[in-house]
């Protein structure tokens, strides 16, 4: 059956806006995906750098400090990596060149901003970041500049990508040919950076005041603020915009700012890591309230999955169990929930709403009970981050108790709603064949590129192919040609169509799916 797509200008404009936000959200998550590796190692090393456990002159302590210094070089320069990651991620072509121009743009800004502060005699007094704390300025790569945190990298990365996408294909002839393509992008960025470096001296203090006010509002909201944060972070997953909820609190000054061991640390997660690495036995920062959204990943999904199984038709239970177990194990171990959640987001939207509300509610309870854990992914991360810090600081046993309560709540509430509202959750189908098994999705044999392209309407219908952590993202010419049943038999747990943009949820194996598609399309990156 073909669908007729009628889009007026206002709707089309909204769709373009949403698409751009989704592209930004996807590009943001690129550099973030590397940070759990750094964070896990820092958390493990915190056991060797804890002055309560080891003497400062011990070999193990010195080794831990040495390795930690390497890792903190990444955490302390997140802005730079966001700049490169966003420029490359948002660039439509020649991504490596965009990232290279972004690196040069970064250093041009630092030099220009420092120069203007010097020329206008606005440099704050201080020979280190500790002495500059509270002045609105900081040292980055040896330059004393306005302290914008990761926002500097986000703004510069987006600016480079914007200019890159519009001018990188322009070429000149003759002697001027060397000034085309990415060199032209760099030339355009030079005056833009010069103006921006001056503007931030006068405008960023105003923005910084607004950020401080926003942080204050979140604190003023207290439990309600934590509830809203947790709810939106879960509820917006179908749109792909949930990254724009948690990432500012986790990695920017919106989530908090502290001076720890002579370094200015911003963002809830860097603050947590710095505190456990330099633990003096004092209570952990309240910014940890933004780090409990992993509770539903470890505990909540299991309860909802059990509700699906218990309410399933008897003839469907065996196949449903085979489908659910690998999804719940993935969620429990590493915190990837989308393959499971997309089983019911669109077939039972009311249940999805309640599921998200319960997630926010239990995060709120964790804050009210003074839980100070870092639980953003699965149980592996949870153990590494929180056990070394100690139960007296993190109150992780309370978190576990709340998690078990969430499991029970998800099960009983989910079971009640499925039965009384006759919801179309997995296992409710009349026929024995339930959802396809995503356990095999993403494996080399899960889907051929030809099968996926066929489901997308053929080669001629595909404009561009990309992916994030769990989704294949495709722009198509005619959405009416998409055959969802073929995409689902290729291993996709769900298909989202928004205008000319399609997202197919494959889970952790999405990279292999994209590679198969690229090979079939003869695309080389």
Image (spheres, rainbow, N blue to C red):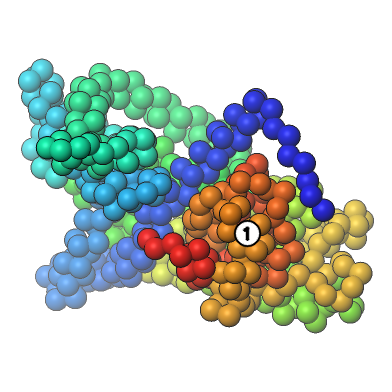
| Mark 1, secondary structure of its residue | loop
* 482 displayed left or right of 90: right
For this view, does 236 lie left or right of residue 413?
Answer: left
Q: Residues within 10 Å of mark 1 (few under 14, many from 20)?
A: some
Residue 252, position as x, y percentages in the image: 37, 41
Residue 192, quarter of picture: top left
> Looking at the image, which residue is at 56% across and 69% down?
449
Residue 73 appears left or right of 457: left
Give the answer, above or below, for where 226 lies relative to 382.
above
Residue occupying the point 19% across, 61% down: 69
* Residue toward you, 136 or 430: 430
Q: How many marks?
A: 1
Q: Residue at x 67, y 52 (%)?
A: 496
Q: Could one spot residue 149 in this view of the protein?
A: no
Residue 34, position as x, y percentages in the image: 36, 60
Could you say where residue 462 lies in the image, as x and y percent from the top left? 57, 53
Residue placed under numbered mark 1 in the picture: 458
Above or below: residue 293 compared with residue 143: below
Rendering quarter of residue 195: top left
Q: Is residue 384 left or right of residue 417?
A: left
* Residue 113: x %, y % from top left: 16, 29
Viewer can see residue 74: yes
Residue located 32% across and 50% down the image: 94
Relative depth, front residue between 358 and 491 = 491
Name the quarter where the C terminus is drawn. Answer: bottom left
């Amino acid at each position: 059956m073909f669908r007729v797509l009628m889009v007026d200008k206002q709707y089309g404009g909204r769709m373009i806006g949403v698409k751009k936000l989704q592209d930004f959200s996807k590009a943001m998550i690129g550099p973030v995906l590397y940070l759990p590796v750094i964070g896990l190692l820092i958390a493990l090393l915190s056991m060797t750098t804890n002055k309560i456990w080891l003497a400062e002159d011990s070999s193990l302590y010195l080794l831990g400090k040495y390795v930690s210094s390497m890792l903190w070089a990444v955490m302390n320069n997140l802005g730079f990596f966001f700049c490169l990651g966003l420029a490359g991620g948002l660039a439509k072509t020649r991504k490596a060149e965009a990232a290279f121009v972004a690196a040069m743009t970064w250093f041009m800004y630092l030099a220009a901003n420092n120069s203007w502060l010097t020329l206008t005699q606005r440099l704050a007094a201080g020979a280190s970041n500790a002495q500059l704390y509270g002045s609105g300025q900081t040292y980055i790569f040896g330059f004393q500049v306005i302290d914008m945190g990761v926002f500097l990298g986000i703004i510069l990365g987006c600016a480079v990508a914007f200019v890159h996408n519009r001018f990188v294909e322009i070429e000149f002839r003759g002697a001027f040919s060397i000034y085309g393509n990415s060199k032209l992008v760099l030339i355009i960025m030079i005056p833009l950076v010069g103006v921006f470096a001056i503007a931030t001296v006068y405008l960023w203090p105003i923005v910084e005041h607004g950020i401080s006010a926003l942080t204050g509002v979140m604190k003023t909201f207290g439990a309600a603020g934590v509830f809203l944060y947790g709810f939106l972070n879960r509820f917006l997953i179908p749109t792909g915009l949930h990254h724009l909820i948690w990432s500012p609190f986790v990695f920017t000054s919106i989530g908090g700012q502290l001076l720890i061991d002579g370094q200015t640390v911003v963002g809830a997660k860097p603050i947590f890591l710095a505190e456990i690495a330099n633990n003096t036995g004092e209570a952990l920062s309240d910014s940890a309230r933004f780090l409990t959204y992993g509770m539903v990943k470890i505990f909540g999904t299991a309860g909802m999955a059990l509700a699906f199984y218990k309410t399933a038709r008897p003839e469907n239970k065996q196949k449903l169990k085979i489908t659910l177990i690998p999804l719940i194990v993935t969620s429990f171990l590493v915190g990837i929930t989308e393959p499971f959640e997309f089983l019911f987001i669109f077939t039972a939207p009311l249940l999805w709403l309640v599921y998200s509300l319960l997630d926010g509610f239990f995060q709120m309870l964790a804050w009210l009970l003074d839980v100070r854990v870092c639980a953003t992914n699965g149980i592996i991360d949870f153990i590494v981050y929180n056990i070394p810090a100690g139960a007296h600081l993190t109150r992780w046993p309370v978190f576990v108790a709340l998690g078990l309560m969430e499991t029970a709540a998800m099960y009983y509430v989910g079971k009640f709603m499925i039965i009384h509202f006759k919801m179309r959750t997995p296992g409710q189908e009349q026929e024995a064949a339930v959802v396809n098994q995503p356990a095999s999705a993403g494996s080399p044999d899960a889907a051929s590129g030809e099968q996926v392209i066929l489901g997308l309407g053929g080669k001629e219908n595909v404009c561009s192919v990309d992916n994030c952590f769990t989704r294949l993202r495709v722009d198509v010419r005619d959405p009416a040609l998409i055959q969802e049943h073929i995409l689902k038999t290729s291993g996709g747990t769900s298909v989202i169509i928004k205008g000319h943009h399609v997202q197919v949820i494959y889970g952790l194996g999405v990279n292999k799916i994209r590679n198969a598609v690229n090979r079939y399309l003869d695309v080389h990156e």
